[in-house]
Amino acid sequence: MKTLRLIGVTLLTVLLSVSFTACGGDDKDEPSGGGGDNKSLIIGKWKVVGESTWRATNVEYKSDGSFSYTSTEDPKYEEHGSYKIEGNLLYELFSDEEDWDMKKIVVLDKTTLTLSNSSGTKQYYLQRVI
């Protein structure tokens, strides 16, 4: 009887451990809310909110792959360039630079865009302008 109970407990343990590990591949390194739709969700005007080291206070991403940074505090300030999205990474190429600037998309939904620098030490918070 003890042998039968031991076999039952062992079988149950194996079945439970297999069913828990089988679900491990469901996690994706995608931003919350964005899924695979980042390219269309990012299009539009965004306002920088919270503390930021950015000079820009507004960012606009256009459907043609271009972007522009402007500032309400300095009307003469404007930077522009091209962008591309690969998975949860946003690449920006400013018109006066030769290297792509990479940021990780942490959150992207209809109203919120949160980016982090490549090392993950700083986050930038943006809110969609309606």
Image (spheres, helix red, strand yellow):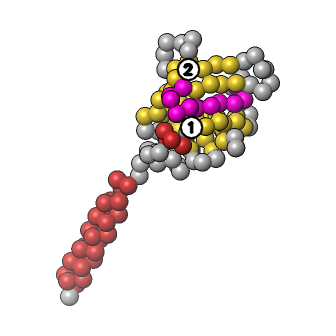
**Is 74 on the left or on the right of 80, as rendered?**
right
Magenta highlight on residue 58: yes
- For the residue marked with disc 2, what is the amino acid? Gly
Could you tell me which secondary element the residue under label 2 belongs to?
Answer: strand
Q: Identify whether 45 is placed above or below 30.
A: above
For label 2, the residue is: 81
Q: Which residues are magenta?
A: 56-66
| Residue at the spot 64% in from the left edge and 47% down from the top edge | 111
Q: Identify whether 17 is placed above or below 25.
A: below
| Towards the viewer: 105 or 10 | 105
| Towards the viewer: 49 or 72 | 72
Q: How many marks?
A: 2
In percent of width and height, residue 24 lies at: 36, 55
Q: Residues within 10 Å of mark 1 (few under 14, many from 20)?
A: some
Q: Quadrant of residue 11?
A: bottom left
Q: Quadrant of residue 58?
A: top right
| Towards the viewer: 97 or 103 | 97
Q: Identify whether 94 is placed above or below 34.
A: above
**Is 97 on the left or on the right of 26, as rendered?**
right
| Residue at the spot 38% in from the left edge and 55% down from the top edge | 26
In the picture as drawn, the residue positioned furthest to the right comes out as 73
- For the residue marked with disc 1, what is the amino acid? Ile
In the picture as drawn, the residue positioned furthest to the front comes out as 64
Quadrant of the drawing holding the C terminus: top right
* Residue 43 disc label: 1
Could you tell me which secondary element the residue under label 1 belongs to?
Answer: loop
| Towards the viewer: 111 or 65 | 65
- Can residue 5 be seen here? The reply is yes
| Residue at the spot 56% in from the left edge and 15% down from the top edge | 95
